Amino acid sequence: MDNQAASNRLQVGQNARVPALGSRTLGIAVSAVSMAAAANCFLKYLWWTACYSAWTGIPKLAQQWRKAGARASLNGWSFLALEAASVLVVFSLIRLRVTGRLAASLIITFAGTGLLALAISVIKQGH
């Protein structure tokens, strides 16, 4: 009886670790959307930071550069939060050791966000 209970626990433990195909597909979709949103926030952060830098010190544009600073901060924090969420989702999808999963999820997420930022900037420029 004890062997059967141990065997059942082992099966349940192994089955619990293998996500279903639908949940893996959903995880990939969520991470891709999160990376795309993070890339867009990163580009907006760069834009508003450049505006803030250009408008700082011009008394006529004081209200605009304050708003630009707030928008840059919002987009910067949004980028970090979305990137962290994407890393966590990719981390949960990869089946490696913990250090390997962390390294792989960081590389995949940063590379994916960088490529999506490049694609979004090219699309927005119309080339």
Image (spheres, rainbow, N blue to C red):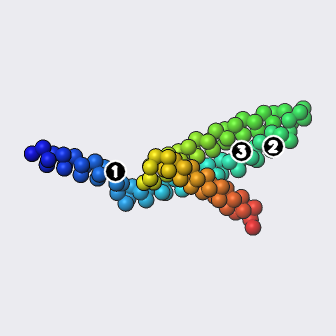
Closer to the chain start, of discs 1 and 3, is: 1
Label 1 or label 3, whichever lies nearer to me, is 1
Q: Is residue 23 left or right of residue 109?
A: left
Q: Secondary structure at mark 3?
A: helix
Q: Which mark is residue 17?
A: 1
Is disc 2 surrounded by few (<14), some (14 to 19) or many (20+) residues within 10 Å? some
Residue mark closest to the camera, 1 vs 2: 1
Q: Is residue 93 above or below residue 122?
A: above
Q: Quadrant of the rendered structure where residue 119 is?
A: bottom right
Q: Quadrant of residue 23?
A: bottom left
For label 2, the residue is: 51
Element type where label 1 sits in the image: helix
Residue 113, numbered label: none
Q: CA distance from mark 1 to mark 3?
A: 38 Å
In the rendered image, residue 51, in percent from the top left (x then y), is placed at 81, 43
State the residue in front, 73 or 21. 21
Q: Badge 1: how crowded within 10 Å, few (<14), some, or many (20+)? A: few
